[in-house]
Every structure is written in C-alpha cells, then in structure tokens.
Image: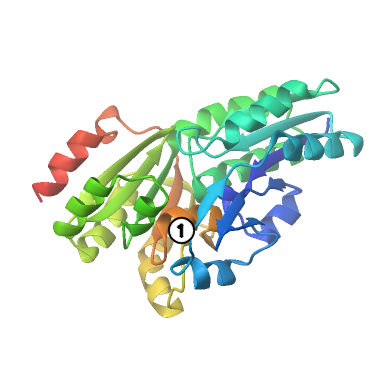
Amino acid sequence: MNIKIVTDSTCDLPESVVQDLGITVIPGYVTLDGKNYLDGQEISRADFYRRLASSQPPATTSAPGTGAFLKEYHRLIEAGATGIISIHVAKKLSNISNVAQLAAEEVKEVAVVNVDSGQLTLGLGLLVVEAAQAARAGGSLADITALLEELIPRTYSYARLDTLDYLRRSGRMSGLGHSLASLLNVRPILKMNNGQPHMEPVRTRGKAVARVLELTRQLGPLQKLAATFSGDVDAAAFEEELRPYRELAAPGQPVMVNELAPVIGVHVGPGGFCVSAIAERPLPAAHRLSEMADMIRSFAR
C-alpha cells in the first residue's frame, strides 16, 4: 500500500518536514503590486513581507486551478501511489478545498479522498503530518481518513493580530467593522476549530497575548503544538512569547515553528502570532463558545 498525502501552501509546514515525510504541497497564488506569484516558489517570505504594506493595488490571493491538482495527482500515481488523501485549508476560509474536490473527481486510476481540515496554517499542517506519518506506517485510505475524522475536532488554532488593516484590505472585513474596532483599540483573536471561525475582540495587545495563552492552556494535555508568526518579527521577542507554550508541549514533543506563508500573510499582515494544537481528548461543549458569547465575554473583561 502506497498512500500519498497532498496539501496546499496554507499549511505552513517547514520544508524539512515536507521533504522528510514526502508530502506534496500545492501552492496558492499571491498578487503583489499587480503581479501573480506562486506562493513559496516565486516569492520568498522575506520579499513578500517587505513589500506587503506598500503594494498597489493591495495584495490579494487566489486558489490554484484544478489543473495544478490534477498534475500532482497524476505524478504521484505514475510514481506508484495506490491512493491519495488531499487535505486542505477550511472551506469557510478558502475555495482551495472545493477546487481540489473537482480535480479528485476527475481521477479514475486510484481513489483520491479530499478532506476539509477545518483549519488554517499549522492547524492544517499538524493534521497533514499525522496523516503522512500514518501513511508511512502503512495505513490504508480508510485508516488515515478515520484518523483525520477523529483528530479534526480536537485541533484548534488561536491567532493574535496586531492590526485589522489587512483583513479590511483583502475584503475579509467591512470598512464599518474596521472603523469600530480601530476606535475601540481592539486587538482581535481569531479562533478556528472544526471548520468554525470566530473572532474575539480584546482591548489591548497585552490582554490579547495573555488571552491566547489562556485559551491554549484550557485545551488541557496537548498531543501536538505549533506556532507561526508573520512579518519582520524580533527573534528575541518572539522566543519570549513562545516560551510558555514550550512548557505546555507534551514531554519529548518539540514545538513546530514557522513563518506564515504569503497566502495567509496577505490577510493577517505583519506582527501576527498563531498557536495551533491538537488536544489529547475532546473538549466539553462549554469550551466551544459562540462568536456572540466571545464578544460579550471579552468586553466584560
């Protein structure tokens, strides 16, 4: 049995991990200063973040076409794949998974299973790693799909944004919402679990930093932990923010760290920080607050 794992460039996996586990990463597109670039191939993270603020028109992103997926699916089949699992960023955040599904339906030689991770950045990346390790161990399509179905509800991402400007520029936030948030000095926390995105507004950067750590601690024992950052981040300051998370990691499990890919950085901007984790067990329903409850709770703090 030779099951191969495919994902997209929003996964933010370090290249060393991608190469070691034989993961195929389909790049999305970033449009910067009116020119299209393949994410991770035709523009570096450093160059992207250096140019992001001044890009005219504002930077945008787009999903790869079905042809990109078909090309990689057929390449893997020709190399001996007996099945493919294609795992992608949450459908509520991007059209990538829908495009992958259309491509999968055209493949007749082997089964191609498309999975909506319900996640973003290294929340997706951690799930991809679990699937790739299971494939390496000889797992079948059914085995790996069942594993993902069990892990996805236990996977969480919490992102702290330093600014809402880039969400507004990319069309992910209304001008009115941006104006109100700026007036109230809101530092948003974006939450993602099982395909459901929420935003919790927090009034200051310090409270946002503390809140993300609090949310991560509430997950209880962690199976896996990872963190991403965006833009020109001071290494010492980032390591200081990351230190308490390293203490939460499972014994013997390193915290995977990487910089946010341009396809996500377009919407986040510089100064962002995101922690992603797989909890050892499902959380009680009370932890899964609604967006309205999040907002009421935060403004009562």
Of 29 and 89, nearer the camera is: 29
Residue 281: image quadrant is top left
Of 29 and 88, nearer the camera is: 29
Residue 136: image quadrant is top right
> Quarter holding the N terminus?
top right
The correct choice, above or below, for 214 with respect to 139 in the image is below
27 to the left or right of 273: right
Q: Position of residue 40 (x, y in %)?
A: 65, 59
Amino acid type assigned to the residue bearing label 1 in the image: Pro
Give SS at disc 1: loop
Of 95 and 252, nearer the camera is: 95
Badge 1: how crowded within 10 Å, few (<14), some, or many (20+)? some
Question: Which residue position holds label 1?
Answer: 58
For residue 131, say whether it is visible.
yes
Residue at image position (43%, 53%) is: 267
113 to the left or right of 292: right
Residue at image position (25%, 32%) is: 290
Q: Position of residue 57 (x, y in %)?
A: 48, 59
Q: Position of residue 101 (x, y in %)?
A: 65, 26
The correct choice, above or below, for 112 with respect to 267 in the image is above
For residue 253, say whether it is visible.
no
Residue at image position (43%, 78%) is: 234
112 to the left or right of 60: right
Residue at image position (74%, 55%) is: 20
Q: Position of residue 158 (x, y in %)?
A: 37, 49
Of 141 and 31, nearer the camera is: 31
